[in-house]
């Protein structure tokens, strides 16, 4: 009978607190992940929204091409109009 | 049942309840994590999809800009020479010459001349127009070409016309002088004759310059139509006079070019005195002036 009581005391005083402690640690860790994941999701959505301007690069590309063509035209004209520097 | 057995059952029940509570809470938290990760993965997927063409587009833009830089650097060095080109770069952007030109190795070692002494102020002004035009300098976004968002498109939008179309292509500068492939003869004469090759050969190089200085009428010379001349054009023929355009002498007898060969200063010099006039000899007996004596000594190279 004494052993039964000893077993009960061990269950209530040692096993139960240890189990509760471990389970609470797992639960706290799982709950700590949630805000972080939510921030990651928000950042990804914001980054995706920032990249909405990427198609404008196509316009920039066309403008750069046109500008370089104009510069090449002016350069060609200047090449014809202005004499070359004298060679040493 | 003994009391110890009851206590044991209660203890086991407490443990099971604790397990259930915490494990269920953990499951709920993990499901929230899963949901958040799904959102994050969706956002990352959008980022990947949207940024996929960026590399190709940026590489194409950089290639075009590289071609433009190569063109401008090559043109600058070709027209101004490497040394003056570095001086021009240094004059516009102090310190930039130390970095050198990208396509000209060794250009960073060139000592840039003080470009303001090589090029006129007007040349520097033209060179500055691209990046430091007043309208760009006063812009809150800074100089136009330094602003990647407000590049040349903004500057070009200031002008309603495309400047390349007016004129489409400038003609080459005319080559003038005796070596010019096309000889432009003046359409009017102002004193003397236009020296031909024989006259230039006889008179020497100075006569050739008279031919070089003539601007043909179709290029805006002084004898061009009035509408082609500027408001401050040169004086007209009514003031400067003009030749008759004929080789015939203007006087009845003409000019005898051989008269000078038989000239005699004692008989031909000076005006003809009137009848009975006595020569003025009042100074004949006077001593020579000191300045005349000194002049004579200097010409002889000897002292008296």
Image: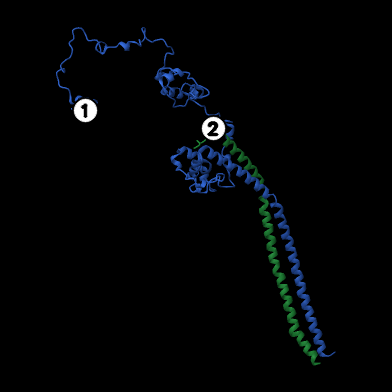
Chain colours: A green, B blue
Residue extending furthest toward the front: B302
Image location (x, y in percent) of residue A75? 57, 37
Please tell me the numbered disc located at residue B25.
none
Visible in this render: residue B138?
Answer: no
According to the image, label 1 marks what residue?
Answer: B302
Image location (x, y in percent) of residue A30? 72, 70
Question: For numbered disc 1, what is the local secondary structure?
Answer: loop
Q: Is residue B11 left or right of residue A32?
A: right
User: In which quadrant will I find the C terminus of chain B?
Assistant: top left
Question: For numbered disc 2, what is the local secondary structure?
Answer: helix
Q: Is residue B273 left or right of residue B141?
A: left
User: In which quadrant will I find the N terminus of chain B?
Assistant: bottom right
Chain for numbered disc 1: B
According to the image, label 2 marks what residue?
Answer: A81
Circle 2 Cα neighbour tier, 10 Å, few/some/many (<14 / 14–19 / ≥20): few
User: Which residue lies at the image location 55% right of the left edge and 42% below the top edge?
Assistant: B73
Of residue B18 and residue B43, the one placed in the foreground of this image is B43
Of residue B300 and residue B29, the one placed in the foreground of this image is B300
User: Which residue lies at the image location 18% right of the left edge and 12% below the top edge?
Assistant: B279
Image location (x, y in percent) of residue A86? 50, 35
Chain for numbered disc 2: A
Q: Is residue B247 left or right of residue A69?
A: left
Quick check: B74 above or below A28?
above
Visible in this render: residue A11?
Answer: yes
User: Which residue lies at the image location 74% right of the left edge and 69% below the top edge?
Assistant: B29
Quadrant for residue A21, please give it.
bottom right
Of residue B114 and residue A47, the one placed in the foreground of this image is B114
């Amino acid at each position: 009978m004494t052993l039964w009581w000893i077993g009960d005391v061990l269950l209530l005083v040692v096993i139960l607190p240890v189990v509760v402690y471990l389970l609470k640690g797992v639960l706290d860790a799982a709950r700590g992940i949630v805000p972080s994941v939510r921030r990651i999701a928000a950042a990804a959505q914001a980054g995706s929204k920032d990249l909405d301007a990427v198609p404008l690069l196509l316009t920039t590309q066309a403008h750069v091409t046109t500008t370089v063509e104009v510069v090449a035209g002016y350069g060609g004209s200047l090449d014809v109009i202005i004499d070359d520097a004298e060679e040493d | 049942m003994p009391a110890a057995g009851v206590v044991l059952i209660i203890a086991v029940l407490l443990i099971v309840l604790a397990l259930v509570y915490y494990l269920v809470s953990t499951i709920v938290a993990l499901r929230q994590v899963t949901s958040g990760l799904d959102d994050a993965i969706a956002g990352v997927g959008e980022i990947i999809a949207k940024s996929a063409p960026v590399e190709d587009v940026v590489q194409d833009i950089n290639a075009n800009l590289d071609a433009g830089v190569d063109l401008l650097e090559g043109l600058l060095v070709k027209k101004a020479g490497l040394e003056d080109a570095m001086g021009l770069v240094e004059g516009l952007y102090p310190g930039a010459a130390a970095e050198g030109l990208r396509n000209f190795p060794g250009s960073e070692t060139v000592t840039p001349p003080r470009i303001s002494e090589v090029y006129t102020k007007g040349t520097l002004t033209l060179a500055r127009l691209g990046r430091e035009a007043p309208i760009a300098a006063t812009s809150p976004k800074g100089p136009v070409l330094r602003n990647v968002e407000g590049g040349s498109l903004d500057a070009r939008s200031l002008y309603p016309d495309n400047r390349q179309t007016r004129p489409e292509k400038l003609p080459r500068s005319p080559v003038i002088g005796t070596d010019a492939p096309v000889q432009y003869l003046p359409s009017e004469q102002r004193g003397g004759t236009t020296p031909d090759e024989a006259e230039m050969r006889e008179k020497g190089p100075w006569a050739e310059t008279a031919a070089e200085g003539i601007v043909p009428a179709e290029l805006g010379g002084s004898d061009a139509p009035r509408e082609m001349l500027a408001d401050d054009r040169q004086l007209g023929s009514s003031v400067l006079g003009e030749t008759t355009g004929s080789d015939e002498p203007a006087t009845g007898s003409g000019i005898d070019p051989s008269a000078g060969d038989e000239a005699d200063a004692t008989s031909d010099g000076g005006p003809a005195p009137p009848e009975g006039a006595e020569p003025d000899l009042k100074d004949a007996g006077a001593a020579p002036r000191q300045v005349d004596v000194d002049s004579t000594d200097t010409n002889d190279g000897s002292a008296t």
